[in-house]
Image: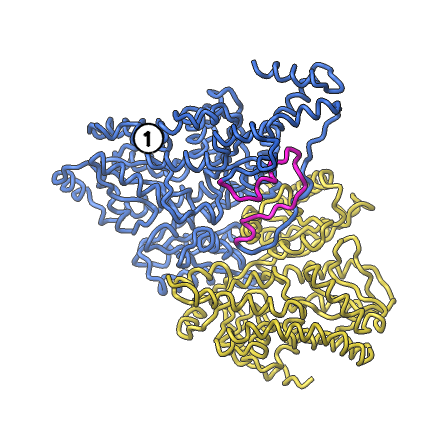
Chain colours: A yellow, B blue
Amino acid sequence: MNAPALCDIPVTIENGQREVFCGLTGIVWLHRKMQDAFFLVVGSRTCAHLLQSAAGVMIFSEPRFATAIMEEKDLAGLADANEELDRIVHRLLERRPDISTLFLVGSCPSEVIKLDLAKAAQRLGVAHQGRVRVLSYSGSGIETTFTEGEDTCLEAMVEAAPYTDAKQLMIVGTLADVVEDQFIRLFDQSGITEAAESVTFFPPRRAKDLPAIGPNTQFLLAQPFLNATRRALIGRKAQHIVAKFPLGVEGTSHWFRAAKDHYNAPDDAFDQALEAPKARATQALQHYKSQLNGKTVWFMPDSQLELPLARFLNEECGMSVLEIGVPYLDKQTMAPELSGASGQDNVVEGQDVDLQLERLRKARPDLTVCGLGLANPLEGEGLTTKWAIELVFSPIQGFEQAGDLAELFARPLNRKQRLAV
Amino acid sequence: MELALWTYEGPPHIGAMRVATSMTDVHLVLHAPQGDTYADLLFTMIERQGKRPPVTYTTFQAKDLGGDTADLVKATISAAHDRFKPNALLVGESCTAELIQDQPGSLAKGMNFSVPVVPLELPAYSKKENWGASETLYYVVRTLLSQPNVSVADEVSNDATKNRPSANIIGPSSLGFRCRDDVTELTRLLNSLGIDVNVVAPLNASVADIKKIPQADFNISLYPEVSKTTCTWLQKAFGQPFTKVVPIGISATLAFIEEIEALTGIDAGAVKNLENSRLPWYSRSVDSTYLTGKRVFIFGDGTHALAAARIAKEELGFDVVGLGTFSREMARDVRAFAQELGIEALITNDYLTVEEHIQQLNPELVLGTQMERHIAKRLGVPCAVISTPIHVQDVPARYSPQVGFEGANVIFDSWVHPLLMGLEEHLLHMFRDDFEFNDNAAPSHLHGSEGATHNEALSEKSVVETAAETTSITVENHESIATVTTDTAWTPDAEQELKKIPFFVRGKARRNTESFAKDYGHNPITVDTLYEAKAFYAR
């Protein structure tokens, strides 16, 4: 790889008010992915309120997540808080016999009062042995931003995973089922599955099917926000196959090729398997390219998808990237993405939202990718925006979704052109 | 600890944000961890606000906790003051900051700003959103009215020169239910009575407006959850009386006008006429016969639930089969009115309890918050939203107040709209064997696919939530819904006969018959049992 030395990449670091979600938000998609898991946030009314607000206030009969809201008496003594937590968990598990894995999710208040959820998970795991696995991780805002909640969740799962020395390729990071199925087909057709002996996805669709991990596990990251998970996997002697993230035609090709190269899978089958989907993706992109080409785009820090998306918009859609805000930057995980030509001198790590908005107003990009709190205010100032959260909740990875991904960015511009009011 | 799946109210600092965001020239600094900025989207997405809420957060992280977070608080307050140049600075904290005890309010007081500082106590582990809004409004009003330039002389000179009585409207706020339009409608009503509106607070009020509050003759406490504390204090401090009736519904509007007559000595004349609204005639018109005795379940904040119960009973002729609120502050009033209706009030913050009650009571219409809308949608019961919490579709573009005579018109339309029209209900019954009028036919004025929800068995269909689509976030099959199960067998003839009963009452007929059969030991249920049960429940 011809990446510049990591220390050469100029990154501006900013401190100030951060306009980002906390890691609890990850529950919104994690509970959908693992349909036998329950997520119990141990926190405050704010946590419960955040979850229902961030989730677009979807109300279902009984979702597989909830908040154990701490009250004044829980703050008085940790012994009582633990007792209360046990009581709530017992009641919850009684109600929900369908649950195989319970995640105790730490929050800002539980971290601050030092409620030890790892210990609680152990205790409860023993109490419900054989029926429910109890794991814990932190989704607190003082420790995690937005997608980092998936990272800490998967990290906890890696630590709980059994050992294997069987050969396998593991795809790490939540993907929509439809994307996983497409990827499985491509791995099979391209000969990678055969060369790797088996392909598993992590997190699994059912939390109880926790995959085993060991020295013959190689893994590809499907999501760019899995730094702690990556380290935990390496700690379990698994090897990271470094690749760009599977966004756009180039990113997806690079991702698959990295696996092929690692396993020395035959070129013929690989090229043949990728040919048709690549051609379809290129064709789908073509339509939106004309709408995006030459336009300017600005990323506010949100999900960690900013760098690979900037690369996609720049290299495949012809947009120029004015600023790439990222909540935090792990140069190790992001190395392949930092090697592109996508406005790397404009990477800003951290945030001072007021200063950033000042720069944004001066630059007036054609398109601003930002969170829900900022979108309408910026539209109100005549700027065109794309909700960043949609990029996390929609299937955007892989060849078949490359066109959809471009469309997400083209739609606001398209609307702007149509509206006469 | 309280196990919460969904919460009807946010924490108290959200209430403080609602007050700050309502006003035009204040700024709120919240000592709060990274992530608490999510609350901005309530305003920018649900209410489509075109500007950021005037709120700055310290967004501290774990690494800050090692150092001096008090310095971070001061630096944030100072920067917000310099950048936004507010005319008053509100300072509070969210749940996590409360635990680290930096006392941001006191810190701000010590910083000697030239603008008034309002420190807020927002106990997150015992109080909730509406309480936070009420307290914040109270402290803002109290602090600003304790400033030196609010003079009694002003009041006197004003009293001497003016010839029309004036009132303040207290309580309307950002993210309240239809507050924007209620203010317009109420202003119109007051003007027609010859009364000027002096100040509306907190919605669109400036610091200067707040200082003018004592100049009015009386206050209108529009949403007691938010306004009562402030109005009570204003009465004590400035001798301003305040209204007790919330003018939602015809009889409440008339009672409100009478209250104002008593307070001001004016004669309302032609304004005090129920025919100023179309609701009374619409309710008496022939088509509305089908509304009579419809079973309705009501749940919401205290103000709106109470108003809805009275309107449902007296102005539409419904049977109120369930009434409840999540506003503990108003539990007593709601309990009292429920007793009048011969039912027991449901006072709870637990969404599952509400759902359970709706399922048991089997209503034909649900009036609730957006939570109840989702419950009703799942159960295939028509629903209208009457209270917060709301979602984006509950902030309509069109004029749609709840208060006053026009509010009554809006309420008639929005509650009746989800139901079948009277004549249509009749026709469906007559022609139910025709293919156009099958059991799955939706009300002709509603979206086509909705008919499917009329299936009496609570089908396990995936519920595509409009709400979720609006923010384009994931859609989920609802889980573990209780299905109607029964130990009682039906003979094929009885099943056949049951199908001849119009589908919109068939669920009720089935349940009634089964409970009758159980009580009187009929098993299996025959055609005779069905009609015996019908006679039994007819009374």
Residue at image mark 1 = B253
Q: In this view, does A243 lie above or below B156?
A: below
* Residue at horizontal 30 percent and vertical 37 percent from the top: B234
Queried whether the magenta region covers residue B460, the answer comes back as yes
Q: In which quarter of the image is the N terminus of chain A?
A: bottom right
Instruction: State the quadrant of the C terminus of chain A.
Output: bottom left
- Is residue A16 visible in the rendered image? The answer is yes
In x, y percent, where is residue B430? 56, 27
**x, y (%) of residue A199?**
80, 66
Element marked by disc 1:
helix
Residue B53 falls left or right of residue A346? left
Answer few, some or many: residues within 10 Å of disc 1's Cα (few below 14, many 20 plus, some between 14 and 19): many
Residue drawn at x 32%, y 50% is: B204
Q: Is residue B108 placed above or below B491 in the rendered structure? A: below
Expressed as whole percent of the image width and height from the top left, the position of residue B364 reads 54, 30
* Image location (x, y in percent) of residue B396: 42, 47
Q: Which residue lies furthest to the front in this view?
A: B434
- Outermost residue to the right: A165
Of the pair A9 and B447, the residue shown nearer to us: B447
Q: The residue marked by circle 1 belongs to what chain? A: B
Disc 1 residue type (three-letter): Thr
Between residue A214 and residue B527, name the one nearer to us: B527
Q: What stretch is highlighted in magenta?
A: B445-470
Quick check: B179 above or below B533?
below
